[in-house]
Every structure is written in C-alpha cells, then in structure tokens.
Image: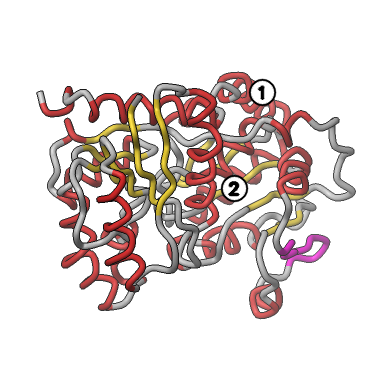
Amino acid sequence: MIDVALDARITPRMSAGVRSYVHALLDGLPRVAPDIRLHPVGHGLNFGLDEQIALPAEIARLKPALTHYPTIFAPLRRRKPYVAMVHDLTHLQYPQFFGYGTALFYEAVATPMLRGAELLLMSDERTAAACVTLLRVERERCRVVPLGYDPAPFAAPETPPAARPFILYAGNHRPHKNLGVLYEAWVGLPAAIALDLVITGPDDPAVRKRYLRPGSELRFAGTLSEPELVAAYRTASAYVHPALVEGFGLPMLEATVAGTPVIASTGALPSILAPFASTFAPHDTLALRATLTDLYANPASYRRRAAEGSVAMRAYTWDRFAAATAAVYREVADGSSRV
C-alpha cells in the first residue's frame, strides 16, 4: 500500500478547473487505484499559519511515501518527495496582466517549490514545454496527464434545439482570456448572419452596449450548473475559446464530448483536441471572423468533425485521469523517477 498525502484544501484562490482537479482525485483514486491510500490534508486559506505550520506538521505525522500539491500554494517547509501540479504558467507568460506581488511570489516561492518537486504534473504538452523554458526544469521530470470530464451529465436525454442559433464561451473574463477578440470577431460578422453570442459569468452592461449587432444578441448567462452547461454545449452552433493561453481548458474537452464544434486560439487548444478543432492565431480577429462565417455557411462539415472528436474524447474521463495520476505516484514511490 502506498500512502499519499494530498493537499485537499479548497480555497477562494482556486479556479473551477483546479477545484475539479482536486475533487476528481478524492473521488476517483480510491476507485481506480486500490493500492494507493490517499490522505486528504490541510485546512484554512492560503498564505496563513495553517498553510505554513499546520499543514507540514500534519504531513510529517503521516510520513507518507509522497505528497501531492495540486497548486503552487504550498508550505515553505516541504517533506520530500513530493509532486506538484502545474495547471499553467500564465503569470510568467503574460506578466503584464498581473501585479508586482505576483511576480515576486513566483520568483521567491512558487518557482523554487516547483523546481524542488520529484516530478511535475501538467495536463498538456504546451505546459510541459513552458516548464522547461520558464522554470528551467528537465523535460524528463514532467508528466503529462490530461484532465477529464464527468460522463454523468452527458448521459441525459438529448436537448431540444435552441430557439436562436448561438456560439458559446464558458469561463472567466480575465484579460488573458482574450474575450475582446471574440467580441470584435462576432460584432463584425456580415449582417445576414443571425448568430447570438452567449458568455457564461456575470452580466457586463458596458460590453453589451459596446458590441451591438442588429438581429443578433450578446447575452451573459451567469453561473450554469453542470446539466445546464452540457445543454448549452449541445445546442450551441460552436464553442469558441479565444484565450491567449490555457493549461488545458476543460470547456473545450466537454464541448467536444458533447459533439459541438470547437473553435479555439492556437495558444489555448489542448493537444489531444487538435485533430478535431478549428484554430486561429490569438490576436487574429479577422481569422476568427472568417471561421465563424464559414461555420454559419457550412455547419454540416463542422458537425462531422465534431462527431469524430466526440467518439475519440469520450475515453478521457476523470477516472482515466485518476488512474494516470496513480501511475505517477507509483513511479515516485518505487524510486524509478530517480533512475
């Protein structure tokens, strides 16, 4: 039996994707890896005494074979060996979107923590390449484990068609998500194309006022439940993801599983989805507009490609992810990662 301590804290600093990552490990590992005994550890928020004193003390008492830190928010005193998850390196790739404090944190805390890991986990080859370039770690210490999806919401009956054709984006509205390119591409579509744009998250009246298209509508959908999001994927004409960079991008996987055409920037698209999606350069508004125009004119060809992707991506469940993570634990526990 391999004892693994998992920092299972769910804090306000964790994105929806990071929360899904932790929950998938807690739920899936006991089911798919009976030889691994997972110990959830940690309490409280980031940057406090719980993180710096209570958490390392709890791990020291357990004496696990290894510890898994699923974020960069780890104690300064860390018991070895440990593995760490690198969801993305957006803060290093686009520092202009973040403050001086963030840069200092990466230099003084996050980068040394990641370099000290026995192995680094990430969900896409692009992130592994960024780790080599920006963290100066050896590629041999990187293990790519793609994220997954929950099959349950996709087992629901088919969703009735939408009353109006629309394209969808699901995610936050931070600067690196590059939503301005999507707005500009959409608002400049030919007038004959009746195509709404639906964005999850809170309403933004200023954006709605700025981007107006006669006969079409820009709508903010708020927070959607999993069944509501699956229904939105299924009824959308396409899912569009314009982000400058993504560590993985769960909505793109979920949309593909739903059989919805995916259009994504080359900086955001996960490698496993590359054969099934349409891409554009992150700042190329005209290229995205041309793809949306072609989608409207030739929807069947996009749907055929999406159907192929749906078949291929249905294997990428959270259980598959948990089993692949367990293989990394075994590699560290038996010492083969140091050979």
- In the drawing, does residue 246 fall left or right of residue 291? left
Q: Is residue 200 above or below residue 306?
A: below
Residue type at the position of mark 1: Ala
Q: Is residue 119 above or below residue 268?
A: above
List the residue tagged with mark 2: 240
Q: Which is nearer the eye, 193 or 96?
A: 96
- Of labels 2 and 1, earlier in sequence is 2
Q: Is residue 74 above or below residue 337?
A: below
Give the residues drawn in magenta, as a range: 213-222
Q: Is residue 158 above or below residue 77?
A: above
Q: Tag 1, which secondary structure? A: helix
Asked if the stretch drawn in magenta spans residue 75, the answer is: no
Q: Which is nearer the eye, 242 or 171?
A: 171
List the residue tagged with mark 1: 307
Residue type at the position of mark 2: Val
Figure quadrant of the N terminus? top left
Q: Which is nearer the eye, 78 or 64?
A: 64
Q: How is the image coloured?
A: secondary structure
Task: Identify the residue shown where x is 29% and y is 32%.
Answer: 143
